[in-house]
Image (tube, rainbow, N blue to C red):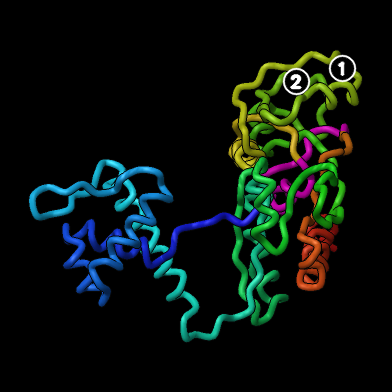
Amino acid sequence: MLKRYPSIQSMQAFLQAARVGSFSSAARHLSLTHSAISQQIRTLEEFVGQPLFVREGGRVVPTDAGVLFANQLADGFEQIDRALSSVKERTVERSITLDVDPELAQSWLVARLPALLGALGSTSLTVLSTPRHERGAFERVDIALRYGYGEWDGFENVLICGDRLTAVGSPSLLQARGLGAPLSPHQLLDLPLLGYTKRSWIPWLAAAGLPAVEPNAVAVFDNAAALIAAASASVGAGLARGLLAADAQRNGTLIELTDVEIPTHYNLYAVWPREKAARVAPLIDVIRDLVAQTRNPH
């Protein structure tokens, strides 16, 4: 439902009167009559449901509500000015806004921005990383890369890739203990372990044939990219997605520690508003190619 707002003119009249303390002075500044200023402010007061000015001697003084409104309104007009200046009398280049899961942005996207920008040609790219629970963000962007189950009702989506979870750690973590990969599951559990707030070790333990009891962790992270960085720094061993850990494995800071792996069910999707389908189709192809190159570099 479309919201109803007071007129810009009435808000400008109010703000000017609040600054100078006089309806007459505000009227002269805005090239209006005193009665016009009074009417606009009266209309504004009716809209907000309370007085915005009181008379003190020969001046008009904002009420507490008027002071609060003036402070907020001044910031609002500055934002309007910036918005107008951003497009006034200038050629706006074609652009695409891409919202990326924060963990994917840190672990995977940044290293591939040159390739992505090269594929976009003259189209500029704005990259956002909004929190996962803000589903309304999909309406404000051209395309989003999010982990999920493909459950985004009202939006188009396509699976970018499935994945697998493996236990990873740094070579130096093993060397310090005189071990070599692959480890047995029991050997891995003797290492310091890293936890992740969105994932349990229990499915991996079940796949390894071990009791389904959550092990103690030396550190627990709410961000998979931070977990991967900690594992690379020899803090401990952790479970990681193949896509997110691929670069660390390629540069040798991480290795897979056992032969046990489990498939993921919460996977990477591209999500976009239906009306943006033609606009984002080339970008989806580029992203799929970059993901494929990550997983199969040769």
Q: Using the rendered view, name the quadrant where residue 128 is placed.
A: bottom right
Q: Is residue 179 left or right of residue 69?
A: right
| Residue nearest the viewer, comparing 66 with 128 | 66
Dots 1, 2 in contact, CB < 8 A: yes
* Residue tagged 2: 189
Q: Using the rendered view, name the quadrant where residue 271 is placed.
A: bottom right
Task: Give the image location of residue 9, x and y in percent.
Answer: 38, 67
Q: Tell me the residue at 50%/78% (across/down).
A: 87
Amino acid bearing label 1: Leu
* Residue 258 lies in the magenta stretch: yes
Residue 251 visible (yes or no) = no
Q: Tell me the residue at 60%/31% (across/down).
A: 235
Residue 215 visible (yes or no) = yes
Q: Which mark is residue 116?
A: none
Q: Tell me the residue at 25%/63% (across/down).
A: 16
* Residue 149 lies in the magenta stretch: no
Q: CA distance from mark 1 to mark 2?
A: 10 Å
Q: Which residues are magenta?
A: 241-260
Near mark 1 (Cα within 10 A), the count class, few <14, some 14-19 or many ≥20, is few
Task: Give the image location of residue 37, x and y in percent.
Answer: 28, 65
Residue at the farthest left position: 57
Q: Tell me the residue at 64%/70% (across/down).
A: 114
> Secondary structure beneath disc 1?
loop
Near mark 2 (Cα within 10 A), the count class, few <14, some 14-19 or many ≥20, is some
> Secondary structure beneath disc 2?
helix
Q: Using the rendered view, name the quadrant where residue 147 is placed.
A: top right
| Residue nearest the viewer, comparing 79 with 288 | 79
Q: Earlier in the sequence, mark 1 or mark 2?
A: 2
Q: Is 277 above or below relative to 201?
A: below
| Residue nearest the viewer, comparing 160 with 82 | 82
Q: Which mark is residue 210?
A: 1
